[in-house]
Amino acid sequence: MEYVIDKSIIEAAKGGNKYTSDLLFPFASNNMPHFVVKNTMILDEYHKLADEMILVWLDLVTNNNFWKDVRCSEEPIFIKTCKNTFDKKLIVSDKYCYLDYEGLEPLDKEEAISEILPSRITVNQIGNNNQVTTGNNSPITSSSV
């Protein structure tokens, strides 16, 4: 899966919070089948906003080769680049600002975390019976394995 990560996410992830660890850093993991879309203009935006943790993330994604190059030099760069991707997924801080852009699938940062993190298995034990569900959005969350 290819994702364009809007600069609003980089801004939200500054300072090493949950958006750094739960949203950005999974893209640098060998266990993820996802790629971050980039081009020169997007990387320039990332570097303008980057703090120390964002720079570490950029290095990890680069070293593990989890970039997907998509050429584009038109503004607005994140939207136009996303329209040139196969999956058309744009991760933003507030997806409601992007719903008017036809053909894009905007995901807000919480939805994106849910979509990119590996699925969990949840086991609910009631008496002698067990019920197992999978997925991050599993309805049963009494105990996780």
Image (spheres, helix red, strand yellow):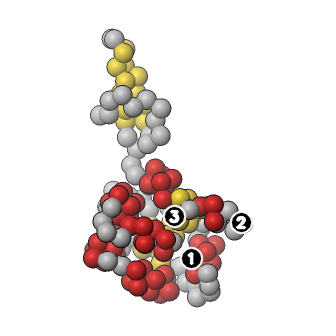
Callouts 1 and 3 close, C-beta under 8 Å? no
Q: Is residue 92 left or right of residue 117?
A: right
* Amino acid type shown at disc 3: Ser
- Dot 3 falls on a residue whose secondary structure is loop
Q: Badge 2, how many Cα within 10 Å: few under 14, some, many 20+? A: few
Q: Position of residue 8 (x, y in %)?
A: 49, 71
Q: Can you say whether 142 is above or below 109 in the image?
A: above
**Mark 1: amino acid:** Phe
Residue 39: x %, y % from top left:
49, 83
Instruction: Answer above or below: position of 66 versus 34.
Output: below
What is the spatial separation of the Cα atoms under label 1 and label 3, in whole angstroms? 13 Å
Q: What's the residue type where badge 2 is placed? A: Asp
Q: Residues within 10 Å of mark 3 (few under 14, many from 20)?
A: many
Query: With 76 as the anchor, is 119 left or right in this view?
Result: left
Disc 2 target residue: 100
Q: Is residue 87 visible?
A: no
Residue at 43% across, 72% down: 11
Q: Which residue carries the number 1 mark?
A: 78
In terms of secondary structure, where does tag 2 sit?
loop
Q: Which residue is mark 3?
A: 93
Q: Position of residue 9 (x, y in %)?
A: 46, 68
Whichever of callouts 1 and 3 sits on the residue coming sooner in the sequence is 1
* Helix, strand or loop at mark 1: helix
Residue neighbourhood size for the residue with mark 1, other residues' Cα within 10 Å, grouped as few (<14), some (14–19), many (≥20): many
Upstream in sequence: badge 2 or badge 3: 3
